[in-house]
Each structure stands twice: as structure tokens, then as C-alpha cells.
Image (cartoon, rainbow, N blue to C red):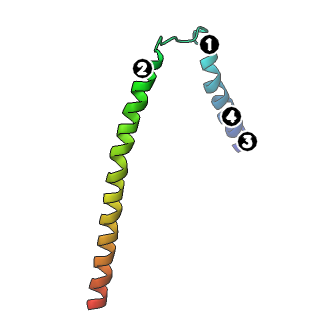
């Protein structure tokens, strides 16, 4: 009984991945030039540049909370 369930699950997974082959055969063209990709890359650099300091602040906050907890344990 369990073997039938495993085979059925495997067939369902294979059929789920094959369904994309019935989609339109033509590739989608976005007609984006090099300047559009440069702009998107610049936007990504801004996002990463904003995330790095935020992560550093969060790590500093976590370190401060940990240090405060160890000082409280030593005081007791």
C-alpha cells in the first residue's frame, strides 16, 4: 500500500514539472537595453548599501543585549 502511494507521489511530481513544456514555445522578449540593466544594477547596489549598515546595527544590538544579560547574571 505504501509503495503505491510513493509511486503515485512520484508520478504526480513528474507530471507537475512536465506541464511547463506545454506552454508557449516562443521566448519572451523584454527589449530592455543595456541602460535598463545598468539602472537595475545601480538600484540593487543601493539596496545592498542600505542593508549592510542595518545588519551591523542589529548585530551590535544583539551583542549589547548579550553583554547586558551576562552582567546581570554576574550581579546576582
- Residue position marked by numbered label 1 in the rendering: 22
Query: Label for residue 10?
Result: 4
Q: Are marks 3 and 1 in contact (CB under 8 Å)?
A: no
| Residue linked to disc 2 | 36
Q: Are marks 1 and 2 in contact (CB under 8 Å)?
A: no
Q: CA distance from mark 1 to mark 4?
A: 20 Å
Q: Of helix, strand and loop, which one carries label 1?
A: helix
Which numbered mark, 3 or 1, is in the foreground of this view?
1
Cα distance in 3D space between marks 3 and 2? 52 Å
User: Which secondary structure lies at badge 2?
Assistant: helix
* Image quadrant containing the C terminus: bottom left
Looking at the rendered image, the quarter that the N terminus falls into is top right
> Neighbour class for label 3 at 10 Å: few (<14), some, many (≥20)?
few
Going from N to C along the chain, the mark reached first, 4 or 3, is: 3
- Callout 2 crowding tier (Cα within 10 Å): few <14, some 14–19, many ≥20: few
- How much space separates mark 3 and mark 1, taking CA atoms? 30 Å
Residue to which mark 3 is pinned: 3
What is the distance, in whole Å, between disc 2 and disc 4 at their CAs? 42 Å
Q: Residues within 10 Å of mark 4 (few under 14, many from 20)?
A: few
Q: Position of residue 47 (x, y in %)?
A: 36, 39
Q: Quadrant of residue 21?
A: top right
Which residue is drawn at the image coordinates 30% and 71% (left, top)? 64
Residue 2 in the figure: left or right of residue 41: right
Q: Nearer the viewer, mark 4 or mark 3?
A: 4
Pointer 1 with pointer 4, Cβ within 8 A: no
Q: Residue 48, position in %: x, y?
A: 39, 43
CA–CA distance in space, label 1 to label 2:
31 Å
Mark earlier in primary sequence (3, 1): 3
Q: Quadrant of residue 14?
A: top right
The residue that appears at 32% across and 59% down in the rendered structure is 58
Amino acid at each position: 500500500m505504501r509503495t503505491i502511494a510513493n509511486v503515485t507521489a512520484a508520478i504526480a511530481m513528474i507530471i507537475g514539472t512536465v506541464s511547463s513544456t506545454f506552454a508557449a514555445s516562443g521566448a519572451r522578449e523584454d527589449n530592455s537595453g543595456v541602460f535598463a540593466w545598468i539602472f537595475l544594477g545601480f538600484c540593487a547596489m543601493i539596496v545592498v548599501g542600505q542593508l549592510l549598515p542595518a545588519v551591523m546595527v542589529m548585530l551590535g544590538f544583539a551583542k549589547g543585549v548579550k553583554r547586558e544579560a551576562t552582567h546581570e547574571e554576574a550581579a546576582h
